[in-house]
Image: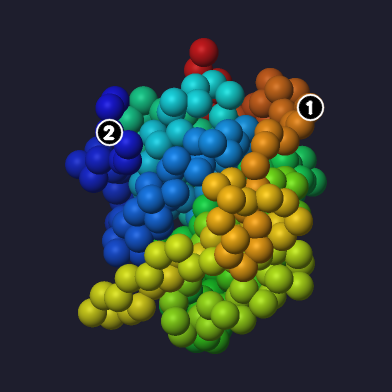
């Protein structure tokens, strides 16, 4: 398929799954604007936390298709209907990702620690009563608790553990989430950051923030808050990880694995 992003008519839906909306489009637009850098970055492993309909992870897979089989994808969501919708959206666009039904990345953190080169997340960021956070169904896709930060603040340390030395994190946030404070939290973990897209709608003011470790050089030589990263990480155990040793995931056989549920989606060669 020649398109660089997922086509809305091919995106699978379900009444309990968040449909692509302004925030989804903002994240994909930010990734598309950064596509040249992403291709130069040559990621080996990319992950979306909270994949919903699959629009974002499918778009990312299409954008990175020139890299061929060297890049692998993971997608997680706490909602089993979202995991199934993502599977259908990926298949409709003839791209592939491992899909794990899990809360953020439960069950994957140790296995993938320090190995993920790109993490993308459109988190539940809407300020809501605390009791709505993490509930079942579609509400979990937007309920963010006080200041919309309850889930965001859980995701940040997980992303830090997952990201490789050259890892990049792309995150959507609202003005109400206090993006500058989110950047400070990540700065304490050694990350520089930049808002790479801002977009206002009738209901909200959206920001897409890019994070990277401060200690490495900028891809295009420009200095921002700190330098961006270049070079391939040495994921020596990636092929073992994806070969089926503990990571076999086939078509909608929901098997419990620690805190997560596997989809057995098998590799397509």
For the point 43% across and 70% down, the residue is 207
On screen, residue 213 above or below 65: below
Q: Residue furthest top?
A: 269
Classify residue 141 by image quadrant.
Answer: bottom left
Say if residue 259 shows up in the picture: no
Residue placed furthest toward the left: 9
* Residue 74 in the image, given as x and y percentages of width and height: 57, 39
Lateral position of residue 144 relative to residue 162, left or right: left
Percent across and percent down for residue 201 are: 26, 75
Q: Nearer the viewer, residue 215 or 8?
A: 215
Counting from the top left corner in percent of width and height, residue 162 is at 71, 50
Count how many numbered circles sit on residues in the image.
2
Residue 42 figure quarter: top right
Q: Can you say whether 146 is above or below 16 in the image? A: below
Residue 160 numbered mark, or none? none
Q: Position of residue 228 (x, y in %)?
A: 63, 53
Query: What is the quadrant of the N terminus in the image?
Result: top left
256 on left or right of 250? right
Q: What is the quadrant of residue 238 in the picture?
A: top right
Q: Are marks 2 and 1 in contact (CB under 8 Å)?
A: no
SS class, disc 1: loop
Observer-nearest of 260 and 174:
174
**Residue linked to disc 1:** 236
Crowd band around label 1 with a 10 angstrom C-alpha radius: few (<14), some (14–19), many (20+): few
The residue under the point 75% across, 47% down is 165
Q: Which mark is residue 3?
A: 2
Residue at position x 20%, y 41% from top?
9
Residue 12 in sight from this viewpoint: yes
Q: Circle 2: is it few (<14), some (14-19), or many (20+) Cα within 10 Å?
A: few
Q: Is residue 137 above or below residue 125?
A: above
């Amino acid at each position: 398929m020649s398109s660089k992003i997922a086509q809305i008519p091919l995106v699978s839906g379900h009444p309990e799954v968040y449909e692509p909306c302004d925030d989804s489009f903002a994240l994909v637009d930010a990734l598309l604007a950064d596509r040249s850098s992403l291709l130069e970055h040559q990621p080996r492993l990319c992950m979306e936390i909270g994949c919903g309909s699959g629009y974002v992870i499918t778009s990312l897979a299409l954008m990175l298709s020139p890299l061929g089989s060297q890049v692998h994808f993971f997608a997680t969501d706490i909602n089993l209907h979202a995991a199934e919708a993502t599977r259908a959206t990926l298949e409709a666009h003839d791209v592939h990702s491992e899909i794990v039904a899990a809360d953020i990345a439960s069950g994957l953190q140790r296995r993938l620690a320090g190995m993920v080169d790109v993490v993308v997340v459109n988190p539940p960021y809407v300020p809501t009563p605390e009791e709505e956070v993490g509930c079942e169904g579609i509400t979990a896709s937007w309920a963010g608790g006080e200041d919309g930060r309850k889930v965001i603040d859980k995701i940040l340390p997980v992303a830090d553990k997952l990201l490789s030395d050259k890892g990049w994190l792309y995150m959507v946030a609202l003005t109400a989430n206090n993006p500058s404070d989110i950047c400070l939290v990540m700065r304490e973990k050694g990350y520089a950051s930049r808002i790479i897209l801002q977009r206002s709608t009738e209901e909200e003011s959206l920001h897409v923030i890019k994070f990277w470790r401060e200690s490495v050089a900028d891809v295009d030589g420009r200095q921002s808050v700190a330098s961006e990263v270049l070079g391939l990480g040495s994921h020596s155990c990636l092929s073992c990880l994806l070969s089926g040793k503990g990571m076999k995931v086939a078509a909608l056989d929901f098997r419990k694995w620690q805190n997560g549920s596997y989809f057995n989606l098998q590799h397509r060669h």
